[in-house]
Image: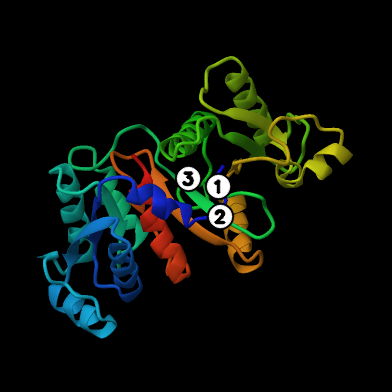
Amino acid sequence: MITKLESFIEIAKSKPRRRIVVAAAADEPVLEAISNAMHDGIIEPILVGAKAEIEKIAAKIGFNLNGIEIIDVADPYEASVKAVSVVRAGKAEIIMKGLVSTGPLMKAVLDKEKGLRKGATLSHIAFFETPYYHKLIAVTDAALNVAPEFEEKVEIVKNAVDTYHKLGIKNPKVAVVCAAETVNPKMEATVHAAMLTMMNKRGQIKGCIIDGPLGLDNAVSEEAAHHKGIKSDVAGDADIIMCPEINAGNLLYKSMNFLGGAVTAAVIMGAKVPIVLTSRADSDKSKQMSITLAAALD
């Protein structure tokens, strides 16, 4: 069980330093996060972007660029393409979004011939450290898949479970959350939740324990589950919250950060390497912890 995001630092330190390439790196918060992660001794960066601007920002924040490779590409999309090519050439094990919109970066990542596709579905997983829960809890997918079909949900679950396995947690508990705890044919999300649960019980999705449909209260509170008569190995002890679609996931993500006092670390999984895709609204610690999480993954 992992209770603190800081644990990712120790996991990452136990492994070789990871090489991270930043697409459109001329971004002050991103460079600060890179500098802090370098200070922790867990990454070696390659910066792709407008070199003069990168150097200007680095001087402002006291980031020593000596020995760091900078590839001068001013256009954000072209910088993304170049960053992807750095990974494909085996020169980096992580890619990070800098001052570029998500769309252009993901276009470069998903290019069928020159991108970083591994499977059919990429998905976002965010780990939260909150004072109101007894361990880290992850939410998927809050940022990438808008209205996933059932087959995509299977892959989203597998990506999340794979992330836990890479962190050394062998059998994470997955709560498939919906607006109701019972299967209702008029609510497709509850049907999908039941199907995921049955696939897990029959060994079609392995390496985890899945239960659903569960309400969010049942997923994180054993007492709430007890009051509703729900008997579950997952209820009250979920590691992963699987959301039905992006609206639910994104609202949960932001409510935990801005109303729940949580700090987060997030990556995109399912590509050939982890992708660090931070938001400008994320705290400095969240950005640094997202880099650290990516570096902690095998």
Q: Is residue 75 above or below residue 189?
A: below
Residue 165, horizontal then vertical, whole percent: 45, 34
Rendering quarter of residue 73 = bottom left
Query: Taking the image as drawn, is residue 138 in sight?
Result: yes
What SS does tag 2 mark? Answer: strand
Residue 282, horizontal then vertical, whole percent: 47, 67
Q: How far apart in space, not on screen, are marks 3 and 1 (Cα)?
A: 16 Å
Question: Is 163 situated left or right of 69 in this image?
Answer: right
Give the mark nearer the N terminus: 1 vs 2: 2
Question: Is 135 situated left or right of 31 in this image?
Answer: right
Q: How far apart in space, not on screen, are marks 1 and 2 (Cα)?
A: 6 Å
Query: Taking the image as drawn, is residue 104 in sight?
Result: no
Question: Is 8 situated left or right of 15 in this image?
Answer: right
Question: What residue is rendered at 59% in x and 53% in y?
Answer: 247
What SS does tag 1 mark? Answer: strand
Residue for badge 3: 145
Task: Count residues near mark 2 (Cα–Cα under 10 Å), then give few for <14, some for 14-19, many for 20+.
Answer: many
Q: Nearer the viewer, residue 44 or 73?
A: 44
Rendering quarter of residue 218 = top right
Residue 179, horizontal then vertical, whole percent: 74, 43
Residue for badge 2: 128
Question: Is 286 situated left or right of 71 in this image?
Answer: right
Q: Label 2 near label 1: C-beta < 8 Å? A: yes
* Residue type (three-letter) at the residue carrying disc 3: Asn
Give the quarter of the figure containing the C terminus: top left
Q: Is residue 236 above or below residue 98?
A: above
What SS does tag 3 mark? Answer: loop
